Image (cartoon, grey):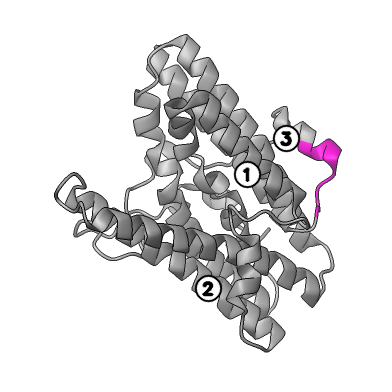
Amino acid sequence: MEFQEQVKQELQRLVAQFAAGEAEVVRTYFARPRTKEQDLAWLKRQAGRELGTARSVVENLVKASGSLDKGVPRRDFESMARALLEEVRHYRLLADLIEELQGAPVDPDELMRYGVWARNPELPENNAHIDLVKRLRREKGELADLALSFFEGGGAGIFIAGSQVAGGALEQRIAEAMKVIAEDELRHGPVHLPRAAAQITDEAMFREVRQIVWEQGMQHLRLRNETFGYPLSEERLREIGEGKIEPMPIDYFGITPGSPYSPDTGGQHPLTALDLIPQAQQGPS
């Protein structure tokens, strides 16, 4: 097998493996009896991640604005602005669900305690994830950035599974919100797989990238399990890390660049990424 084809297949398999694991977290959570408090807990944790990310994008946009067309190409700046729109949209969708459930306005300060980079004694796995990403970037530099670029959102596993949730009116609204987030998130991370794969030039580099993706995938899975109140056992998490799971049935290399929910996708309505999942796999979970 040609080296580049081997790289593509292995990266596809790794991302799909951990995305399937994160999807299993969601399916297991929704398959059990739930309380309003449990739903509010995961919604607030995820909304906090979206809000924190949106604020970070704002900061990056402000910094880049002074260099627009003076080092920062206008198309790159536009892409950053579109990413902001999408992150704010994710926050809005989840915040609306929170307000509906609790019957009161959201508290952004409370939600920011669950931000991507916010250390929180209630969330040891998120804290461990922060430490891991910092260590990988410190030790591996640009190679870590390359590997982490296509794993943003964990392959969108929780959002894809969430878009398939079935039940009453609340579950329907959760599924509708998660479908939008899934389409956007697939363009934030996995859409970069082809570019990343093309930059891997030899076996040594490939081994390092695989190890980075595995470490990130394993800790991100633990983070997701924590978000949903630990529905999966430690034994099951280890099994997923060993590959004892059917990979997410989606062609990550076939994702179109623009989300169908965002403006200006080049004059075409792109094939939605969820269309790449075989119909037999799209039923309620």
Q: Quadrant of the C terminus?
A: bottom right
Determine whether 30 is above or below 224 in the image: below
Q: Does residue 241 appear anywhere in the picture?
A: yes
Q: Which kind of residue does numbered mark 3 sit on?
A: Ile
Q: In this figure, which residue is indicated by the disc labeled 1?
A: 130
Q: Which residues are magenta?
A: 230-237
Task: Indicate left or right for 132 with 88 as reference.
Answer: right
Cα separation, mark 1 vs mark 2, equals 25 Å
Cα separation, mark 3 vs mark 1, equals 21 Å
Element under disc 3: helix
Task: Indicate left or right for 37 with 199 as reference.
Answer: right
The crowd level at tag 1 (other Cα within 10 Å; few <14, some 14-19, many 20+) is some
Q: Give the image location of residue 281, x and y in percent.
A: 59, 50
Q: What residue appears at the point 50 percent right and 61 percent down from the top-left corner?
A: 181
Element under disc 1: helix
Q: Which kind of residue does numbered mark 1 sit on?
A: Ile
Task: Indicate left or right for 215 with 199 as reference.
Answer: right
Q: In this figure, which residue is indicated by the disc labeled 2?
A: 93
Q: In this figure, which residue is indicated by the disc labeled 3?
A: 240
Question: Which marked residue is nearer to the observer: mark 3 or mark 1?
Answer: 1
Q: What residue appears at the point 69 percent right and 82 percent down from the top-left corner?
A: 101
Question: Which marked residue is nearer to the observer: mark 1 or mark 2?
Answer: 1
Q: Is residue 211 magenta?
A: no
Point out the tag, 3 or 2, that comes first from the N-terminus: 2
